[in-house]
């Protein structure tokens, strides 16, 4: 094994055509570093569909994927870098974080013109590793692959998984674990914390360069406009508000909504201690490190606004030459976050309950009563909404919803109110039910099923459950009767009460 990764010359076929805009930014935006080779890479997952969507040579990547996606082989045109960023972690500011175990291989332009990053996560130390080994264990790699692809199938903006490899080398955490690397695809890996990195250094020129890069890449409609940096702030706030509303709609809890884990593209990024709720409770926390519940399910909108406020602070020098006026403009933009969120959440929850577009004054109370009923009765979040999708078409399905409650008789009064409301909706029952099934999944990545797949892979080198779970979750809105057991919440003794950071 050589100390440096093997480079493939430009004269050979290029399974990936790179065009690296971030690597063309000033040197203080990143560190140039190549992946550290591994002993015996093995390709355990390859997302052929995603590769083809990106215009990549899927055949070549699948054939040579072990070497390429481990970082042992660097393709022509790749300019590996680790990006610099800072961040608030659980409210405490850290002025330098950066990619400590991730290396951006480069960017590609899809056939539709969209630009995407290709990044290795777990590929060895970088200048930002802070004494870490830069590696990832197999369990967190499988979790990120499963959940990020499930989020995509659910229709939620997210980074995606292109491939996963085992390294043939152990990593050492509390115990010795098999090492692995996931290849992540994103619109970009630019975070609120990227802006904070330069703001902490008083580097307004770099903030301006970064903001212009973000506009070019993610918000091109703002390019050249007067007041574009304020409009950028508002656009990022709107996308993040919409994203969080969609998280809440499927019971997703990010787990570590630090500013370095908030992408300005509006995509879900970093799947460490994330989880999906079983029984509905806004106070639900799974992350083992979130002792105070800062990032609980119900707190996510407020934290989203808090993160936007931190972004606004970095942009103040660009918003107005007078500091007081800049603060006023920023405060107005931050306050609009909740307006964006409430609009998005209203649309999400109304669609899930089949209420249609004609808003009635009593709808808000009907929605609140349903959430209160689920909380009081410890009802499963996903199954409750899915059963209502059936009940919207046939009242005989009311029993399935009632059976989800601790006291099934408690369902009657709310169902009666709901049916009275639906009677004023012009849609046919079958049409309404179909629209509800399109937003109320039958399957989510249940925590105990993820852990089951991880355990089989880590302990037995058996990836069949991992593969089956990925296949199932690629069609979350289909009933798939053969896999009905995967729709059920955990039995007593199967509950996963804590999830862990993949560091």
Image: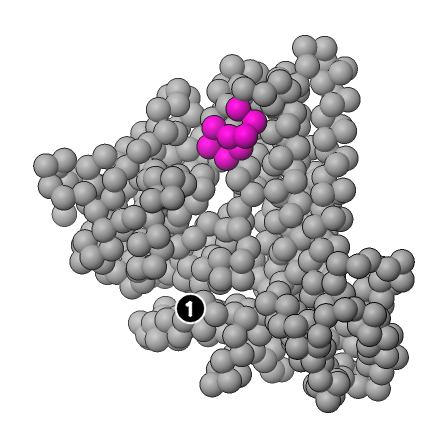
Q: Which quadrant of the figure has residue 327?
A: top right
Secondary structure, magenta segment, majority class: helix
Where 475 falls versus 333 (above or below)? below
Counting from the top left corner in percent of width and height, residue 421 is at: 84, 71
- Residue drawn at 75 percent across, 55 percent down: 346
Where 182 falls versus 322 (above or below)? below
Query: Is residue 338 covered in magenta?
Result: no
Between 48 and 465, which is closer to the camera in this rendering?
48
Where 287 falls versus 125 (above or below)? below
- Residue drawn at 27 percent across, 49 percent down: 56
Residue picked out by circle 1: 470
Task: Determine whether, in the image, residue 13 is placed left or right of residue 249.
Answer: left
Q: How is the image coloured?
A: one colour
Between 71 and 136, which is closer to the camera in this rendering?
71
Query: Is residue 219 covered in magenta?
Result: yes
Counting from the top left corner in percent of width and height, residue 366 is at: 85, 66
Counting from the top left corner in percent of width and height, residue 66 is at: 22, 56
- Residue drawn at 76 percent across, 81 percent down: 405
Task: Determine whether, in the image, residue 192 is placed left or right of residue 365.
Answer: left
Between 143 and 225, which is closer to the camera in this rendering?
225
Task: Determine whether, in the image, residue 68 is placed left or right of residue 501.
Answer: left
- Residue drawn at 69 percent across, 32 percent down: 309
Q: Evaluate whether residue 43 shows in this view.
A: yes
Query: Which secondary structure, mark 1?
Result: helix
Task: Determine whether, in the image, residue 251 is placed left or right of residue 410.
Answer: left
Q: Which residues are magenta?
A: 216-223
């Amino acid at each position: 094994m050589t100390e440096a990764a093997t480079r493939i010359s430009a004269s050979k076929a290029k399974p990936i055509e790179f065009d690296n805009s971030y690597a063309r930014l000033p040197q203080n935006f990143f560190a140039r570093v190549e992946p550290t080779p591994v002993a015996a890479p093995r390709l355990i997952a390859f997302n052929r569909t995603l590769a083809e969507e990106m215009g990549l040579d899927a055949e070549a990547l699948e054939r040579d994927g072990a070497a390429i996606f481990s970082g042992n082989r660097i393709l022509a045109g790749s300019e590996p870098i680790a990006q610099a960023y800072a961040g608030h972690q659980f409210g405490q500011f850290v002025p330098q974080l950066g990619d400590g175990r991730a290396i951006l291989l480069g960017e590609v332009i899809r056939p539709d013109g969209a630009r995407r990053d290709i990044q290795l996560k777990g590929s060895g130390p970088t200048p930002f590793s802070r004494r870490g080994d830069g590696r990832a264990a197999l369990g967190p790699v499988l979790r990120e692959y499963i959940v990020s692809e499930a989020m995509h199938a659910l229709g939620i903006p997210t980074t995606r998984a292109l491939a996963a490899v085992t390294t043939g080398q152990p990593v050492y955490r509390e115990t010795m674990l098999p090492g692995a690397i996931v290849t992540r695809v994103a619109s970009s890996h630019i975070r609120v914390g990227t802006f904070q990195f330069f703001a902490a250094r008083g580097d307004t020129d770099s903030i301006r360069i970064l903001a212009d890069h973000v506009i070019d890449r993610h918000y091109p409609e703002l390019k050249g406009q007067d007041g574009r940096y304020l409009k950028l702030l508002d656009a990022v706030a709107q996308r993040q508000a919409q994203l969080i509303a969609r998280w809440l709609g499927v019971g997703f809890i990010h787990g570590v909504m630090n500013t370095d884990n908030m992408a300005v593209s509006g995509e879900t990024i970093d799947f460490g201690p994330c989880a999906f709720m079983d029984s509905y409770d806004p106070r639900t926390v799974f992350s083992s490190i979130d002792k105070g519940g800062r990032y609980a399910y119900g707190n996510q909108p407020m934290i989203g606004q808090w993160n936007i406020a931190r972004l606004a602070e970095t942009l103040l020098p660009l918003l107005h030459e007078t500091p007081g006026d800049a603060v006023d403009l920023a405060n107005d933009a931050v306050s609009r976050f909740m307006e964006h969120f409430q609009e998005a959440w209203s649309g999400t929850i109304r669609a899930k309950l089949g209420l249609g577009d004609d808003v009635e004054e009593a709808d808000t109370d009907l929605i609140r009563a349903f959430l209160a009923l689920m909380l009081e009765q410890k009802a499963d979040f996903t199954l409750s909404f899915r059963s209502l999708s059936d009940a919207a078409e046939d009242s005989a399905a009311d029993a399935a919803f009632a059976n989800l409650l601790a006291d099934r008789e408690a369902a009657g009064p709310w169902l009666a109110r709901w049916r009275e409301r639906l009677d004023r909706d012009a849609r046919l029952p079958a049409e309404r039910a179909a629209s509800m099934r399109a937003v109320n999944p039958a399957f989510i990545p249940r925590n105990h099923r993820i852990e089951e797949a991880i355990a089989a892979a880590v302990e037995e080198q058996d990836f069949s459950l991992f593969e089956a779970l990925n296949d199932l979750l690629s069609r979350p809105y289909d009933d798939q009767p053969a896999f009905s057991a995967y729709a059920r919440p955990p039995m007593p003794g199967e509950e996963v009460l804590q999830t862990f950071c993949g560091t």
